[in-house]
């Protein structure tokens, strides 16, 4: 199942397929096909079949995919068949926006704590039931609450320093919103979210005449 | 220059290289190499050389890249040698976080207006000098201010409806934060930002033993 040769864009698309399957399931559908998924996601059906082929045979030619079965398989592949304890580190507008995003729990991500160094924020709730703790208690609280993933929404200038502190807590991964490349031990997984990169990719697409770029993503 | 065969991950990496070059320039550097960039970004040097090769010869073997020259080239490729007029559509925590992100103007993205349907927000400032307008004035204000890009931060339930209204304004591209796949005319560029996808990619990485996935991104 854990084939190390799987390209990262495939993993991201699997997450997209999963979300699309959730929508189809909510709409009462039980079966889908690579063509149906392709139409919903504006991706080539051949791409979808190729992505899914990394993990074995999911569907039957001409019969399509059973939505529940495919969702379960993707869930297992992506590690979403467990609950993940998450902390928000940095309670600004962005941290607050993420903490109040209802889609997180649906995906298995449970925010258990938030951290900020601002004394006025410490002790308040970032969202229903989620306390803001003092940064000085980071290690203690993360260990107590068994935090596995940190969502890092602090300013760039302090991001590396805070990331180092996070490593000390024993977390496994960081979703980094600061527009810098963090230097971390091999054992810590990092995923960077930088929407200016997405904006630049958007402007490239706008100035390019050819709109089919999306289809050759790999 | 506008080779339609350029894979999307290459475009995103070009944006990353640009940001890294900015940092190096700020630090007083004038020259860099694929190895130096690779070390800063934790990407293989061969990947960087491959990405840059799509656009012709930038550096000289053994001499490296002139940072200013390489930055200018990437700027032209990505369409960042012009200023882009941007509107924020949906003034919640996320919209506010983005509006106050100082890195935008540095990258050539100028927020000229924000929109919300909440009467209490209309007329306030989302950030210094940026007014919140009524959604009903979307078309009028977007035309007046020559808005080219919309950053869509409205709830999922209304995202498609608002996107349709945005098409009417004559914009060229949408940076979509709503976790749905928008259906839009071919002529409109769309880039989706969904951090739950990034979280799922992170958990995949955490549960996989092999950390070298990042190096085979293409």
Image (cartoon, coloured by chain):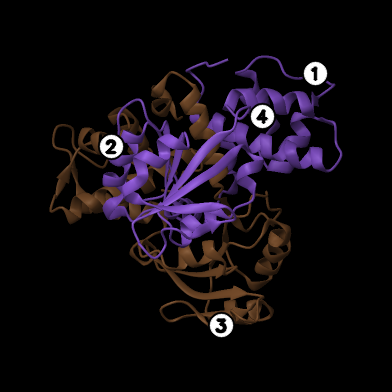
Chain colours: A purple, B brown
Note whether A61 is above or below A28 in the view shown: above
Establish whether labels 4 and 1 are both on one chain. Answer: yes
Which sits earlier in the primary sequence, circle 4 or circle 2? 4
Image mark for residue B144? 3
In front: B169, or B87? B87
- Say above or below: B14 vs B116: above
Q: Given the image, what chain letter belongs to the residue carrying mark 1?
A: A
Can see residue B148? yes
Chain of the residue where label 2 is placed in the rendered structure: A
User: CA separation, marks 2 and 3?
Assistant: 45 Å
Residue B18 is at least partly visible in this image: no
Marks 2 and 1: which is nearer the front?
2
Task: State the separation of the CA atoms marked 1 and 3.
Answer: 53 Å
What's the chain of the residue with tag 3? B
Q: Which residue is mark 4?
A: A48
Please tell me in which quadrant of the rendered image residue B137 appears. Answer: bottom right
Q: Position of residue B133 (x, y in %)?
A: 59, 80
The label shown at residue A183 is 2
Q: Tell me which label, 4 or 1, sits earlier in the chain.
A: 4
Count residues near mark 2 (Cα–Cα under 10 Å), then give few for <14, some for 14-19, many for 20+: some
Q: Nearer the viewer, residue A45 or B104?
A: B104
Q: Gap between marks 4 and 1, in whole Å?
A: 14 Å
Sooner in the amino-acid sequence: mark 2 or mark 1: 1
The kind of secondary structure element at disc 2 is loop
Question: Where is residue B112 drawn, in percent x and y?
Answer: 48, 76
């Amino acid at each position: 199942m854990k084939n190390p040769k799987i390209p990262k864009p495939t993993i991201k698309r699997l997450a997209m397929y999963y979300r699309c399957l959730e929508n189809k399931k909510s709409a009462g559908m039980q079966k889908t096909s690579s063509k149906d998924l392709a139409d919903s996601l504006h991706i080539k059906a051949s791409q979808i079949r190729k992505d899914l082929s990394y993990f074995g045979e999911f569907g039957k030619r001409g019969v399509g995919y059973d939505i529940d079965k495919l969702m379960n398989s993707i869930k297992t592949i992506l590690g979403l068949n467990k609950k993940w304890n998450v902390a928000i580190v940095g309670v600004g507008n962005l941290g607050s926006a993420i903490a109040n995003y209802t889609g997180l729990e649906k995906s298995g991500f449970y925010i258990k704590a938030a951290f900020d160094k601002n004394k006025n924020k410490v002790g308040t709730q970032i969202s229903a039931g989620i306390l803001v703790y003092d940064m000085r208690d980071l290690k203690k609280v993360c260990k107590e609450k068994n935090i596995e993933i940190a969502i890092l929404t602090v300013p760039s200038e302090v991001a590396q320093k805070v990331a180092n502190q996070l490593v000390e807590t024993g977390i496994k991964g960081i979703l980094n919103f600061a527009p810098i490349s963090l230097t971390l031990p091999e054992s810590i997984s990092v995923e960077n979210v930088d929407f200016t990169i997405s904006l630049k990719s958007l402007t490239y697409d706008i100035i390019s005449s050819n709109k089919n770029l999306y289809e050759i993503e790999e």
